[in-house]
């Protein structure tokens, strides 16, 4: 039996290339509809059209006024599913479909959306005829397009895990990343997995071209017990003392524009951190009066709970901007960030300098010191008492902190650099990351937003340097010295750009959590020599400026 379904969804996806447009102005009445054949994209214009008042047979429902409307008569060229859509840039449109021909067509489906509208025709037979009515809100008219195409899900290719369409033939999987998966509203995907006692299953969706929901149930196909209802991500802790066999199903529940989807996910099983809470290496820093002093850097695997907040002391130089970010697993508590003036000894009274309530695996605060003197601040990481889970682990990233006159492990040169297009000097800093084998992490801030750049290294330096474009190259050019660029494939590629807070974001996967650049052992010199113990290297960041110009950061010297 034929089934017709009309649904709406915004134009977010664009999975496939549409045919080029053809002009096919519609008829002004239902009896003068313009005939359309095959599939394609057809342009029309309702500017000169009248309001026909047509709304199908009386039993089709409450009519929707289509304003100035036009009509097309379309006959399905072959069996299958079709997708019909209208699109315009500057007015609200309406689309109605009627089964049959001319003014005798009946059983219409219509609704409205601001700039685009879709209707699905499912299980259509060759020769079926439909009257298509297009228009706009009363007083809304103009050029638009009508597109008729085979529904893309009709040709959806099954993925490599098929046939896993039912609970009975679920595919066993282990923790890992799963890509190039497809699901259909008539073809669910089922997976089976075992959760050890006391551990937590975490499924995080990585990509989804439509609307894939995941469900977690016990491994009982006859009468499964739902452990987690449909959502884009899952988390579940096995509360028992024995392994728990579970089923994960991926379903297309909300069949908006598409009935199918390409998707991927990351499946993890890990210990529940709140069962055996352990202070991290920066403890004790549990009160506002006992913070631990830190600077720019990456501080992984911190622990925080409702009874054990973390406090960090930071110094922010005159007119400098501090950016503090935490990243964590969504499966546990959502830690919040608060930045306090260090003179507020309680870190509770009054208002913080900045705060952020965690959402979507991350939280971050940004604060600019408005004074001409250094400012000491305290960053608090807190799990609120109302959180469902009592704890979490997190990674902390700090950029824009200053030594404020304290000794530093690294020395700078050409500092400050000539101002960039923001009026500030691009600032380069360095820190040692013990968790990354003692590697050096370079991080840049105060750069021009959206501009790209990469890091340079040299065996010597010169100050004030060689003027180039809007800045100065401060790496030594003396005879026998070498300069290299980290813009080669692999670990020696540092290309990135400055994001909204002026911090350098690495897009090559060679930074730390996508920030800065983790210096590799091999140097970008002829022959790719390896860094030697006792060797001193000098680093700068080159970056593009507006108007095709360029600039540099200050330099940092590092002795290994």
Image (cartoon, helix red, strand yellow):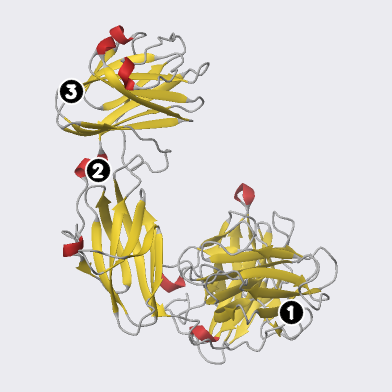
Say the numbered circle drawn on residue 403: 1
Q: Residues within 10 Å of mark 1 (few under 14, many from 20)?
A: some
Quarter of the figure that contains the N terminus: top left
| Pointer 3 residue | 128
- Drawn side of residue 234 relative to residue 322, left or right: left
Nearer to me, 161 or 443: 161
Which one is earlier in the sequence, the residue at label 3 or at label 1?
A: 3
Query: Picture coordinates of residue 190 (x, y %)?
Result: 24, 61
Real-space CA distance between mark 3 and mark 1, rounded to the nearest whole angstrom: 76 Å
Which one is earlier in the sequence, the residue at label 2 or at label 3?
A: 3
In the picture as drawn, the residue positioned furthest to the bottom comes out as 534
Kindly tell me whether residue 24 is visible in this rendering: no
Tag count: 3
Residue 443: image quadrant is: bottom right
Quarter of the figure that contains the C terminus: bottom right
Query: Picture coordinates of residue 86 (x, y %)?
Result: 38, 27
| Pointer 2 residue | 153
Q: Residues within 10 Å of mark 3 (few under 14, many from 20)?
A: some
Q: Nearer the viewer, mark 3 or mark 1?
A: 3
Label 3 element class: loop
Query: Picture coordinates of residue 135 (x, y %)?
Result: 42, 19
Label 1 element class: loop
């Amino acid at each position: 039996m034929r089934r017709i379904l009309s649904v709406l969804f915004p134009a977010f996806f664009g999975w496939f290339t549409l045919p080029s447009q053809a002009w096919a102005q519609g008829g002004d009445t239902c009896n003068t509809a313009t005939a359309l054949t095959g599939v394609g994209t057809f342009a029309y214009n309702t500017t000169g059209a009248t309001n026909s008042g047509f709304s199908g047979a009386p039993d089709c429902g409450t009519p929707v006024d289509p304003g100035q409307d036009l009509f097309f008569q379309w006959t399905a060229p072959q069996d299958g599913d079709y997708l019909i859509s209208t699109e315009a840039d500057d007015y609200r449109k309406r689309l109605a479909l009627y089964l049959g021909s001319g003014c005798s067509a009946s059983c219409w489906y219509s609704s409205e959306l601001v700039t685009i509208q879709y209707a699905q025709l499912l299980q259509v037979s060759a020769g079926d005829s439909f009257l298509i009515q297009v228009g706009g809100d009363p007083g809304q008219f103009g050029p638009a397009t009508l597109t008729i195409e085979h529904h893309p899900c009709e040709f959806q290719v099954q993925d490599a895990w098929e046939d896993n369409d039912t609970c009975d033939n679920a595919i066993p999987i282990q923790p890992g990343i799963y890509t190039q998966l497809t699901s259909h509203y008539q073809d669910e995907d089922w997976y089976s997995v075992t959760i050890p006692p006391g551990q937590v299953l975490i499924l995080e969706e990585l990509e989804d071209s439509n609307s894939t929901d995941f469900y977690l149930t016990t491994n009982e196909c006859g009468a499964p017990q739902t452990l987690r209802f449909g959502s884009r991500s899952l988390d579940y802790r096995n509360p028992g003392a024995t392994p728990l066999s579970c089923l994960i199903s991926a379903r297309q529940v909300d069949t908006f524009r598409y009935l199918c989807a390409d998707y991927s996910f990351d499946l993890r099983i890990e210990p529940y951190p709140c069962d055996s809470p352990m202070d991290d290496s920066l403890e004790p820093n549990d009160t506002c009066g006992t913070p631990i002093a830190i600077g720019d850097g990456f501080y992984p695997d911190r622990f925080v709970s409702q009874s054990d907040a973390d406090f960090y002391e930071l110094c922010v130089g005159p007119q400098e901007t501090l950016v503090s970010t935490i990243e964590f697993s969504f499966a546990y508590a959502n830690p919040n960030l608060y930045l306090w003036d260090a003179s507020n000894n309680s870190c509770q009274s009054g208002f913080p300098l900045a705060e952020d309530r965690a959402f979507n695996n991350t939280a971050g605060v940004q604060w600019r010191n408005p004074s001409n003197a250094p400012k000491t601040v305290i960053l608090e990481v807190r799990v609120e008492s109302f959180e469902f889970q009592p704890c979490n682990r997190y990674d902390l990233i700090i950029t824009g902190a200053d030594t404020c006159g304290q000794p530093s492990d690294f020395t700078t040169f050409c500092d400050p650099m000539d101002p960039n297009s923001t009026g500030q000097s691009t600032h380069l800093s360095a820190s040692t990351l013990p968790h990354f084998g003692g590697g050096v992490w370079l991080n840049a801030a105060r750069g021009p937003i959206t501009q790209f750049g990469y890091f340079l290294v040299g065996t010597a330096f010169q100050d004030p340097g060689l003027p180039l474009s809007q800045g100065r190259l401060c790496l030594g050019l003396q005879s026998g010295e070498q300069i290299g660029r980290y813009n080669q494939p692999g670990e020696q590629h540092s290309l990135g750009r400055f994001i909204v807070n002026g911090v350098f974001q690495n897009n090559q996967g060679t930074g730390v959590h996508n920030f800065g650049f983790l210096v590799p052992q091999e140097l970008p010199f002829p022959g790719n020599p390896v860094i030697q113990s006792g060797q001193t290297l000098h680093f700068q960041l080159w970056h593009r400026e507006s108007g095709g110009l360029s600039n540099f950061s200050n330099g940092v010297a590092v002795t290994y």
